[in-house]
Image (cartoon, rainbow, N blue to C red):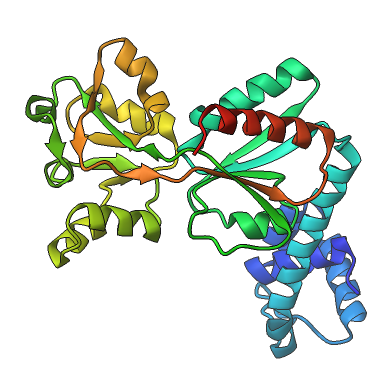
Amino acid sequence: MLTEKTLSAFLHLAETGNFQEAAKRLGVSNASLSRYVSMAEEQVGFPLFHRKRGNSGLTREGQTFLPVAKTLQADLNRCADQVERIRLDTGQTVRIGCGPLTPRTLVRPAIQAALQQSPAFRFRVDVSARQAPIEMLENGEIDIYLGDLTHTSETENIELMMFEKRAVVFAAHVSHPLHDTAPATLNALFSYPLASPHLHKHWRAAITRALGGTDEAAEKVRALPQVESDDYAFLTSLLTGPEFVVGGMPETFAELVADGSVKLIETTPPITWNICAARKAGPGQPATEALWKQLEELAGQNPG
């Protein structure tokens, strides 16, 4: 089987088709690269490249082997990451996956409370609306997930915790015309440019229903949002003028509302969000248990 060095040599030369460029990327001399490539061919048992001056293209066998080599490289990278994680993990680090609406509403207060219990705890927070949380939990990529799992199939080895349903709010600069028509209908609100995180299909279905469930409503929702980002620091920066409406949670806009530059838009009907926390069933590492306990207390403060 290929070693890490011979695998890298093969992949770099396959990508560039040029010995000099591949050697430069690998940080070795042309002679060393040639030696690594020859070793790779010995290790796999067939020729990988044509030997032509100035152009080293893949053989038929090399072309067939290329996707296998890429998969092997990805597996090696994942293995290295897991080894590093095992080496460093003493049960004090929690890997959190969450949707964009949860960092301020749940993640921040839970982390703050857990750190009061033990300042040595560490947290890694990955915010994205496009995560596959159950798979990530089952594969050990994250320890806890926070977001909307209402439409996720139940699994025996995943523990779920439900929080109170909360209404999504919309905000705009104080000069936005929607503030003059409160309460604003959702049809009126979505007639203005919207900035929001990624809207997965269940969110789109909920908004379509709130708009009346008509073909016209579905067409309007398909065009949403005008600006999409899971980074709320960026989204709220769009509220310096009246161009955009931004959807989120009250905590998202608290500072801007407090300084008077932004106002929440009173809307009807409300759109609710089902907040869930999930983790693998059974006892976890100390930091994970501590954070989960804080989330349980937050859920108890807001019983569903």
Camera-nearest residue between 44 and 168 = 168
* Horizontal side of residue 111 vs 234, given as left or right: right
Residue 214 in which image quadrant: bottom left
Q: Spot the residue most to the bottom.
A: 60
Camera-nearest residue between 62 and 31 = 62
Camera-nearest residue between 25 and 18 = 25
Which residue sits at x=57%, y=33%? 299
Look at the picture and state if 285 lies above or below 302. below
Look at the picture and state if 76 lies above or below 193. below
- Dividing the image into 4 quarters, which one contains the N terminus? bottom right
Residue 194 lies, in percent from the top left, at 24, 42
Which residue sits at x=63%, y=27%? 110
Look at the picture and state if 171 lies above or below 89. above
Look at the picture and state if 89 lies above or below 28. above
* Horizontal side of residue 150 vs 244, given as left or right: right
Residue 201 lies, in percent from the top left, at 38, 60
Residue 17 in which image quadrant: bottom right
